């Protein structure tokens, strides 16, 4: 049977790709993101699916009338800086391709099926991840979301207005939420679990608890040549000690701690900085370990700050508790798709946000031979993507033909 996967994939591939790095820069509500949204509308229209944008900017394409007990699948189109092609888009391309498979097979679902593209899953622009699904479920308030700022100082409220979204209306959306009977997100695996198991498709068991913390280090700007070592109040030094402390804090723990983003003020080669801000992304197998790791890093930062005479302030920007996916749904899906293996993940997903909100939710993973993600090296072989699409089609048919 012909698959539409390759054509869908190829049509999305050029949007938002940086020529130099080959990575994607599809940040929420930028031109690249808007072009991805246009692509979503075009793909839905060419399949006769009605598209709506909900109050929070999430896009929905409906096979059947929007209504209760809908079987919803999809993911996100935005990316991290220089992200790979698969994280997010694979779930949306596979969703449209799975609908094509079901139609070619003459399947007539009794429940509506929707493809969703959640807004701003990565949080690359405004700092908070899963903004679209968190707003939908009320896990992020409209008030807090409106005030989020990007690196150029634009608020999310201003940005939404520019994109034609009424920012006054964002927030928990009970109408949109109540229509979701089940949510299934297909995603590229962000590790080598399936490679090791020699299987193309897996099913998620749980998502590790995770969060983001902002560390502000405040010192004193001064001359790089004339300031004696003992006279310095250098926030870069305290930041560097804190990065090392993050490495030490996860030693021997089932935990991860990463400083992947940093701002330096004034950012001059021949000046001691006046301020450094670093963002910690921390995750762990359980919440106690996560809390302990973050507390250890905070304590190490405070101690270094004291000896360096540098101010340290730590602000929690987001926190997601452990997510266990619906066991019955998960096991039923695994059995249905060839006894697919079960895997936990340390990556965050909109599926986790919906599961926390009480929606029966599952995730499928597609093998990633590099095991790399959030980088242009992220990959999935076409044969595995087709296996993922077939698995998703089987799951949709099972859930929607009752
Ligand atoms: C999303 O990909 C995350 O885990 O940060
Ligand atoms: Mn991601
Ligand atoms: Mn993702």
Image: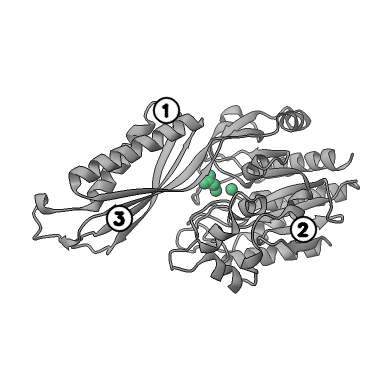
Tell me where residue 39 appears, x and y as whole percent. Answer: 68, 64
Q: Residues within 10 Å of mark 3 (few under 14, many from 20)?
A: many
Q: Which residue is mark 1?
A: 253
Side of 382 where 218 appears, left or right? left
Name which residue lies at 50% across and 59% down.
126
Closer to the N terminus: mark 2 or mark 1?
Answer: 2
Closer to the N terminus: mark 1 or mark 3?
Answer: 1
Kind of element beneath mark 3? strand
Q: Residues within 10 Å of mark 1 (few under 14, many from 20)?
A: few
Side of 233 where 148 appears, left or right? right
Q: Nearer the viewer, residue 346 or 337?
A: 346
Q: CA distance from mark 2 to mark 1?
A: 42 Å
Q: Which colouring convention does the figure follow?
A: one colour
Instruction: Determine which of the numbered discs, if any, sits on residue 276 in the image.
Output: 3
Res 225 quadrant in image: bottom left
Kind of element beneath mark 2? strand
Q: Residues within 10 Å of mark 2 (few under 14, many from 20)?
A: many
Q: Which residue is mark 2?
A: 61
The reply to whether residue 103 is in sight is yes
Q: Nearer the viewer, residue 141 or 301?
A: 141
């Amino acid at each position: 049977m012909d698959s539409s996967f390759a054509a869908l994939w190829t049509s999305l591939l050029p949007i938002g790709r940086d020529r130099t790095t080959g990575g994607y820069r599809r940040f929420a509500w930028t031109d690249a993101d808007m072009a991805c949204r246009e692509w979503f509308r075009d793909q839905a229209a060419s399949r006769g699916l009605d598209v709506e944008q909900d109050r929070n900017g999430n896009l929905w394409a409906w096979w059947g009338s929007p209504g209760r007990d809908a079987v919803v699948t999809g993911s996100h189109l935005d990316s991290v800086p220089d992200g790979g092609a698969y994280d997010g888009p694979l779930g949306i391309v596979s969703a449209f391709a799975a609908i094509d498979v079901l139609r070619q097979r003459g399947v007539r679902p009794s429940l509506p099926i929707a493809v969703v593209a959640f807004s701003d899953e990565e949080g690359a622009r405004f700092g908070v991840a899963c903004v679209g699904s968190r707003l939908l479920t009320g896990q992020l308030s409209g008030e807090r979301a409106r005030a989020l700022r990007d690196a150029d100082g634009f608020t999310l409220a201003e940005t939404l207005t520019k994109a034609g979204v009424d920012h006054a209306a964002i927030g928990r959306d009970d109408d949109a939420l109540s229509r979701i009977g089940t949510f299934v997100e297909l995603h590229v695996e962000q590790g080598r679990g399936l490679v090791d198991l020699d299987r193309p498709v897996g099913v998620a068991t749980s998502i590790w608890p995770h969060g983001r913390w902002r560390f502000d280090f405040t010192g004193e700007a001064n001359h790089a040549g004339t300031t004696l070592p003992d006279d310095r109040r250098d926030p870069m030094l305290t930041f560097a000690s804190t990065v090392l402390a993050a490495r030490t804090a996860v030693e021997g723990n089932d935990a991860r701690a990463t400083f992947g983003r940093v701002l330096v003020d004034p950012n001059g080669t021949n000046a001691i900085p006046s301020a450094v801000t670093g963002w910690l992304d921390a995750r762990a197998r359980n919440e106690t370990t996560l809390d302990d790791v973050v507390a250890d890093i905070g304590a190490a930062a405070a101690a270094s700050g004291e000896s360096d005479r540098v101010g340290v302030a730590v602000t929690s920007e987001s926190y997601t508790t452990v997510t266990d996916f619906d066991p019955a749904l998960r096991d039923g899906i695994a059995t249905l798709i060839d006894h697919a293996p079960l895997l936990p993940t340390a990556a965050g997903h909109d599926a986790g946000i919906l599961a926390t909100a009480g929606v029966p939710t599952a995730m499928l993973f597609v093998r990633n031979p590099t095991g790399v993600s959030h980088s242009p090296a992220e990959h999935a072989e076409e044969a595995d993507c087709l296996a993922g699409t077939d698995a998703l089609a089987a799951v949709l048919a099972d859930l929607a033909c009752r």
